[in-house]
Image: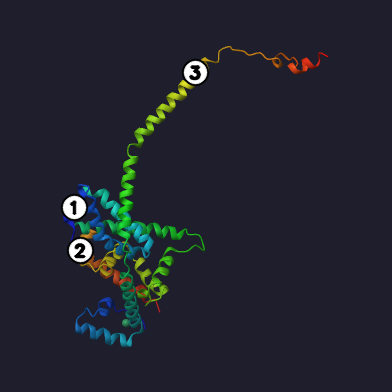
Amino acid sequence: MDDFSFLLEHIKNNNEQAFVRLVEAYNGMVFQLAFSFLKNTEEAEDLTQDVFLSVYENIGQFRNESSLKTWIYRITVNKSLNRQRKLKWCRFFRPIGSVPSDDKNLITEDTNPQYAVLNKELKAKLTNAIDNLPERQRTAFTLYKYQDLGHQEIAEIMGLSVSAVESLIHRAKQNLQAALAEFR
Amino acid sequence: MKCNKKYDFFAYQKRNISPVLLREIENHIAGCDKCRNVSMQVKLLEMAINEQKLIRPDAFMSQRIVAKITNRQSFAGILRPMPAFAIIILLALFVGIGIGIFATKSSQQTIEVFSWNDQEQEVIEMAFLNEN
Ligand SMILES: [Zn+2]
């Protein structure tokens, strides 16, 4: 995907059309990454809106130290992890019998035949193994697997060295394989 | 039998390994239930990830987002002068109440109104009736 850094000055000068172009360029990327963390379309859309609100409000502080895309990725990762922590607490205190948010989303997935290869329980069980990884391993693995990013780009987003990212992905894979060994 | 081999089955599933290692893993999983199962589960996980990667936002999401953010900004613009406005209203309210209290106190001088009943006399209608 192209980097839309050239829109930056226009957005800083309150050009609404430039902001619209930025949202159109990156909303799919932000939504997909948010979904890969939250596994729920409503939550992912809500988070996407939150990310762009943050971009809109803080664009004046953006200093070109990274690309605009990397900066948006970083905001999305941070907000997704925060939301995920909050949702884990909500799930912990959820009243017995209430509908889990994941289930609501999986029903929508099932209405679309392209998602019907694996059944929703199996898919939830498998991807739940990713949710149980330590946060940095989960982040590196998600960016690597769901966004198909290279180690260098992940390192820039996470503010780590490339070797640290390689180590995180390696440990994530080993931990996932250990968890999956229990599945039949 | 407990197997302690630590192969990268993610790389194996993508055939992203050397031919030598590929042959080694294939020979190993032919005789190891545990690794064969892990390899299978990794394949299923890759499928689950690939299915989730197909999920896209609907075509109008960007419009909804822009509308919500710009509405919020204009609402915030309206709200920004609110603190000063609220202080002026509150001050006016306090001044009004103050003036009200002062005026009530100064008008509470000894204006006494006498009525028949205050003097424990009959009400006027009864006085007329008793005349007969
Ligand atoms: Zn084995």
Gap in angstroms between the C-alphas marked 3 and 2:
74 Å
Q: Are marks 3 and 1 in contact (CB under 8 Å)?
A: no
| Amino acid tagged 1 | Leu
Report the side of A6 relative to B80 (left or right). Answer: left
User: Badge 2 local density, few (<14 within 10 Å), some, or many (20+)?
Assistant: some
Rendered image quadrant of residue B64: bottom left
Mark 1–mark 2 contact, CB under 8 Å? no
Q: Is disc 2's CB within 8 Å of ligand 1?
A: no
The type of residue carrying mark 3 is Ala
Ligand 1 within 8 angstroms of badge 3 C-beta:
no
Residue A153, label in figure: 2
Q: Quadrant of the C terminus of chain A?
A: bottom left
Q: Which residue is rendered at x = 47% and y = 24% of the image?
A: B97
Which residue position is annotated with label 1? Answer: A8
Which disc is residue A40 wearing?
none
The percent coordinates of residue A52 (x first, y second) are 28, 54
Disc nearest the viewer among 1 and 2? 1
CA gap between label 3 and label 1 equals 62 Å
Q: Is residue A61 visible?
A: no
> Circle 3 marks a residue in which chain?
B
- Mark 1 Cα shell of 10 Å, populated few (<14), some (14-19), many (≥20): some
Chain of the residue displaying label 1:
A
Left or right side of A2 for A137: right
Q: Secondary structure at mark 3?
A: helix
Q: Amino acid at mark 2?
A: Glu
Q: Are marks 1 and 2 on the same chain?
A: yes
The answer to whether the residue labelled 3 contacts the one labelled 2, judged by CB atoms less than 8 Å apart, is: no
Q: Which residue is mark 3?
A: B103
Q: Is residue B87 visible?
A: yes
Please tell me whether mark 3 or mark 2 is closer to you in this view: 3
Dividing the image into 4 quarters, which one contains the N terminus of chain A?
A: bottom left
